[in-house]
């Protein structure tokens, strides 16, 4: 059974809306940061810290992409964007999905990516286990 985590952008977040391209740019920033960490440590840290390649499909229609694992410990993480509406406002969010067949490694990396995205955007992170972490100033 697939599980989901959400990064919701609130009125206190750095930005109120987000596009899939902006999420991809944040993943590229993450990769650049871990590459620099690897250079400081003197080993290929980026291959261990980001064992995925970003894959886009035609049927995604700019709403989602997935991270395909590059070794046997990692399989797939799906990343999407969307909006939810209530009576007073529209809230943008990033949805991180672990589909059937995801590994424990995928879940660990997904949690790590969610925290990174939530910190960068100063959002509200709804974790896979139902807990909520707040990264915006309250």
Image (cartoon, rainbow, N blue to C red):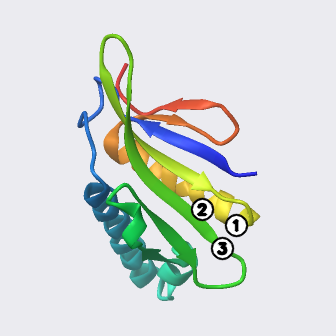
- Residue 46 on image: x %, y %: 48, 79
- Work out how far the residue at label 1 is from the one at label 2, CA to CA, in angstroms: 6 Å
- Work out how far the residue at label 3 is from the one at label 1, CA to CA, in angstroms: 8 Å
Q: Are marks 1 and 2 in contact (CB under 8 Å)?
A: yes
Between residues 17 and 136, which one lies in front from this camera angle?
17
Q: Residue at x 39, y 78 (%)?
A: 35
- Work out how far the residue at label 2 is from the one at label 3, CA to CA, in angstroms: 11 Å
- Quarter of the image where one finds residue 127: top right
Of circles 3 and 1, which is in front?
A: 3
Mark 3 — residue?
75
Circle 1: element type: helix
Between residues 79 and 37, which one lies in front from this camera angle?
79
In the picture, the quarter occupied by the C terminus is top left
Is residue 19 rendered to the left or right of residue 135? left
- Quarter of the image where one finds residue 69: bottom right
Q: Residue furthest front?
A: 59
Is residue 1 rendered to the left or right of residue 93? right
Is residue 131 rendered to the left or right of residue 11? right
Of circles 2 and 3, which is in front?
A: 3
- Quarter of the image where one finds residue 84: top left
Q: Which mark is residue 109?
A: 2
Q: Residue furthest top?
A: 87
Does 82 sit above or below residue 76?
A: above
Label 3 CA crowd tier, 10 Å (few <14, some 14–19, many 20+): many
Mark 1 — residue?
105
Circle 2: element type: helix
Label 1 CA crowd tier, 10 Å (few <14, some 14–19, many 20+): some
Q: Are marks 2 and 3 in contact (CB under 8 Å)?
A: no
Is residue 128 rendered to the left or right of residue 135? right
> Which label's residue is closer to the chain start, 3 or 1?
3
Circle 3: element type: loop
């Amino acid at each position: 059974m697939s599980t989901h985590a959400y990064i919701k952008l609130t009125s206190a977040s750095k930005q109120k809306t987000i596009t899939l391209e902006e999420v991809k740019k944040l993943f590229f920033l993450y990769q650049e940061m871990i590459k620099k960490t690897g250079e400081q440590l003197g080993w290929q840290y980026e291959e261990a810290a980001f064992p995925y390649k970003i894959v886009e499909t035609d049927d995604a229609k700019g709403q989602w992409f997935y991270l395909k694992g590059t070794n046997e410990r990692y399989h797939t993480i799906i990343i999407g964007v969307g909006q939810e509406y209530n009576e007073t406002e529209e809230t943008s969010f990033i949805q991180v999905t672990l589909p059937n067949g995801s590994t424990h490694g995928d879940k660990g990396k997904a949690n790590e990516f969610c925290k990174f995205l939530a910190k960068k955007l100063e959002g509200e992170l709804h974790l896979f286990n139902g807990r909520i972490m707040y990264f915006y100033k309250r």
